[in-house]
Image: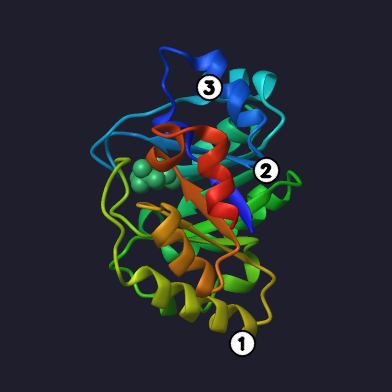
Amino acid sequence: MIIAPSVLSLDYSDTKKQLDELNASGAEWMHYDVMDGNFVPNLSFGPDILKAFCKASPLYKDVHLMIKDPMYYADVFMDAGADLVTFHYEAVEEKDIKVLADKIHARNKKAGISIKPDTPVEVLRPYIADFDLVLIMSVEPGFGGQKFRENAPEKIRETKALIEEMHSHALVEVDGGINDVTGKLCKEAGVDVLVAGSYVFKNDIKKAVQSLCE
Ligand code: DX5
Ligand code: ZN
């Protein structure tokens, strides 16, 4: 299983030390949350911080766009160093979903699609074969430190079944309220990538990452 610590919860008064610890923690991915104060009621980072993180960390850059206009900003974040760009099903018109996946793939990057806790997995049926990753939100997007939504493991199981049925190769990622206990529930449900923000950065980073791998 891949662990993707979310740098939304990184202690920015001590950035260099936290990034060094993250690089040595055993985590393979860095989860980078982009918020526009519009799709979600919060603001986070733009592309320049991602560029800086690319210099400071070799981890795979997993960029989660919680923004209204991913069609424009996907390129901006790919230019800044994103390896994988995930956008929200709820943010785009149906006609644009495959167009955006194709646009990301044309630049040899991976494409992900995310659904909020109340969006059913079934909406992804027509698109799932076009994506490399499905991100199941286990909290309402916008803030770190929220409580895990209990319906997430069932949605992970449904997504795995749909991936198999539609012959997709997509990985399944879960994001929100992940700790050692909720992480296990998702692992049992078959998740491939665990995102964890506050659990990793409010504890000893390496120990927290290792506990998620167990
Ligand atoms: C929430 C973000 C998450 C957030 C998770 O909108 O997408 O990636 O950082 O934080 P925790 O793990 O604290 O719930
Ligand atoms: Zn996220």
Amino acid on which disc 3 is placed:
Gln
Whole-percent x and y of residue 149? 29, 63
Q: Which residue is mark 3?
A: 18
Q: Picture quarter containing residue 185?
A: bottom left
207 or 128: nearer the viewer: 207
Q: Which mark is residue 28?
A: 2
Residue position marked by numbered label 1 in the rendering: 165
**Element class at badge 2:** loop
Mark 2: few/some/many CA within 10 Å (<14, 14-19, 20+): some
Query: Residue 167: image x %, image y %?
Result: 68, 81
Residue 129 on image: x %, y % = 64, 73
Q: Is residue 112 above or below residue 80?
A: below
Mark 2 against mark 1, which lies toward the viewer? 2
Helix, strand or loop for disc 1: helix
Work out which quarter of the rendered image holds the C terminus and state it: bottom right
Query: CB of mark 2 within 8 Å of CB of mark 1?
Result: no
Residue lying at the far left of the rendered structure: 41
Residue that protrudes farthest toward the right in the picture: 108
**Depth order, front residue of 29/70:** 29
Q: Earlier in the sequence, mark 3 or mark 2?
A: 3
Q: Earlier in the sequence, mark 1 or mark 3?
A: 3
Q: Rounded to the nearest whole Å, what is the CA distance between mark 1 and mark 3?
A: 41 Å
Q: Residue at x 41, y 52 (%)?
A: 179
Identify which amino acid the numbered label 1 is placed on: Glu
